[in-house]
Amino acid sequence: MELLKENWIFAEVDLNKVNPITYQLITKMNQISNLPVTVVLIEGSNESLEDDIKEYGPDKIITIKNDQLAQGNDLEMTNALDTLIDKTGRPNSFVFAATVVGRSLAPRLQARLRTGLTADCLDLHFEDDDTLVQTKPSYGDNIMCEIVVPNHRPQMATVRSNVFEAKKFNNPSTKVINITNLKVVKDNQLTILSKPLPQESAESITEASRIVAIGRGDKTEENLTNAKRLADKLHAVIGVTRPLTDLDEFDINDQIGQSGQSVSPDILINLGISGAVQYTAGISNAKTIVSANTDKDAPIFKYSDYYYVGNAEEFSKALERALQ
């Protein structure tokens, strides 16, 4: 099979909109790739989501226009991507979002192509122009390791959301290739019974511009109440570290870090958070970080623009008073 000197990105579509992580991946790949950057988009025959993608400047967009496939299940989309690669050739790399969809499609396709896949990456870069170095936490999230797939193509990875910043880029040379005759293999192994819309809820921490984050050191009921009052004053949302997801009011959607969410707020206030790598892996794109901890050697201070050595509850109350 022909090997293409291109790096591919799968465009994820949610509720007829391109998932923002797609734009983050395009921006990152534009920054690190010496090979053309190609986006693969599956959409309905009357849709034109490629117009939105063009604003971020990939070199090429392959649109598979098929109404059945746009509403298809993960197995049918995997079949389509496998067929596309069989017809066009294997790209140098193929990157997916580390979402529910991406985590389903990528390993299915990887198994068919008999190549390598690194899941939940936090960084990417190339060596020797075409070797994709994929960085992810390992050994209980205590170290960062770099993984390469030197002998197989495409090199595949899923990447966490919000670890890269999306920036629009004018690329007048972007080419759009529409494919309307790709054979769709109907799959009967998986049946979608319904597609319920997500319930409307408070602002997600992945989209929040202001976050007050609570750690194990601020876990008491009184401290939680103080942190919530501070968040209300700042019009911020509450984020937590892994131990606090054991409480009934928090879950993985509120958790910041490697096994939770990556965030990119304008301001992040850490209360009673020590700064283990599991947590700091999710805050690298925060614009301004303020932290309070009683331990003067807490690792979180290395990541902070401003910090207070002392009781996080006292800091929270003092900041709340200052905002009155």
Image: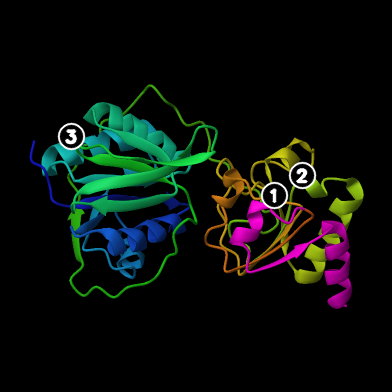
Q: Which residue is mark 1?
A: 274
Mark 3 packing: few (<14 Cα in 10 Å), some, or many (20+)? few
Q: Which residue is mark 2?
A: 216
Horizontal relation, residue 201 to residue 260: left or right: right
Instruction: From the top left corner, tell me how far across and down residue 111 is, in percent.
Output: 29, 27
State the CA–CA distance, disc 1 to disc 3: 40 Å
311 or 262, which lies in front?
311
Residue at position x 75%, y 41% in the image: 244
Marks counted in the figure total 3
Instruction: From the top left corner, tell me how far across and down residue 168 is, in percent.
Output: 37, 72
Residue at position x 18%, y 40% in the image: 85
State the CA–CA distance, disc 1 to disc 2: 8 Å
Q: Is residue 7 above or below residue 85?
A: below
Residue 296 within the magenta-colored segment of the rendering:
yes
Horizontal relation, residue 30 to residue 23: left or right: left
Q: Amino acid at mark 3?
A: Asn
Q: Is residue 44 visible?
A: no
Q: Which picture quadrant has residue 74?
A: top left
Horizontal relation, residue 253 to residue 37: left or right: right
State the CA–CA distance, disc 2 to disc 3: 44 Å
Q: Which residue is mark 3?
A: 151
The residue range painted magenta reads: 295-324
Query: Reading the chain from its start, which is encountered first: label 1 or label 2?
Result: 2
Which of the image's four quarters has the C terminus?
A: bottom right
Q: Amino acid at mark 2?
A: Arg
Residue 242 within the magenta-colored segment of the rendering:
no
